[in-house]
Image: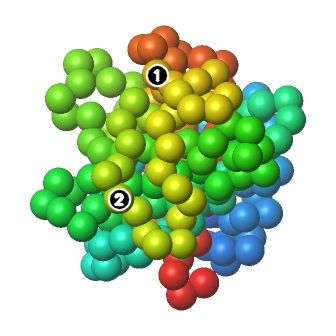
Amino acid sequence: MLLGHQDENTPERITAALDRMSHAGRLATIRAVTADEQAKLWEMFAESPADRDHFVPSGTDPLTEVIHHGRNSLPAFNFFQKRFCAADDDSEELWGFNHQTMSWITGPGFYVAHDTEEEKDAPGAYVINYTRIPPKKPDDWPEILPNEAKLGRFVYSGMKDYMRKISDHVSIGRAYKSGKPMDAWFVLCREDVED
């Protein structure tokens, strides 16, 4: 990907390169990231917190969908989307679900995303939390199901994805199950509404 020769300036180089790209360029780049590179990016951006505005930019109307295209480190079914929206209450939370080809088996994987200020020693400042599901959704999203439904209990139940920011549009996440880190990483690339 963008890693190449690595030194103390590599994170800044990666961020600058991604910020210069078009959406199509960023998308092509994240789709080429290997599992090993995802693990390295997670470590490399340990001091780069993601926040609510990274996933749903400030000023976006509540319940308006914002799509993040993803590539994970799994052996198969690597491409997916996380679809977010701002809550329509005063919580400052984001609500969302996973859009992917296996959702007919696993369920949609709904989540609530929020900061981790109340978590001790959280591995990221922002979390996609599958232990909570949103109370409502945009009309065109699938039916809200518990993450224990279907085979989702093996995928989403007890899971939290902690997030770190790489660039204005790109983030790196790592899955944790029941508080323990998994060998599972993913990169996300936000598609702006005007793109």
Residue 138, placed above or below residue 92? below
Up-down: is 124 above or below 165?
A: above
Name the one closer to the observer, 83 or 73. 83
Q: Amino acid at mark 2?
A: Lys
Q: Is residue 32 left or right of residue 160?
A: right
In this rendering, the answer to whether 126 lies above or below 131 is: below
The residue labelled by disc 1 is 158
CA–CA distance in space, label 1 to label 2: 20 Å
Q: Which residue is mark 2?
A: 136
Mark 1 closeness class: few <14, some 14–19, many ≥20 residues within 10 Å: some
Residue 130 quadrant: top left
Q: Position of residue 157 (x, y in %)?
A: 51, 25
The answer to whether 114 appears left or right of 151 in the picture is left
Q: Position of residue 166 (x, y in %)?
A: 52, 50
Q: Residue at x 69, y 65 (%)?
A: 26
Residue at the limit of the structure toward the left, as seen here: 90
Disc number for residue 34:
none
Q: Earlier in the sequence, mark 1 or mark 2?
A: 2
Disc 1 marks which amino acid? Gly
Pick whichever, 183 or 80, lies toward us.
80
Q: Find numbered disc 2 in the image and state the secondary structure of the residue it sits on.
A: loop
**Among the 4 quarters of the image, the one containing residue 138:** bottom left
Q: Residues within 10 Å of mark 2 (few under 14, many from 20)?
A: some
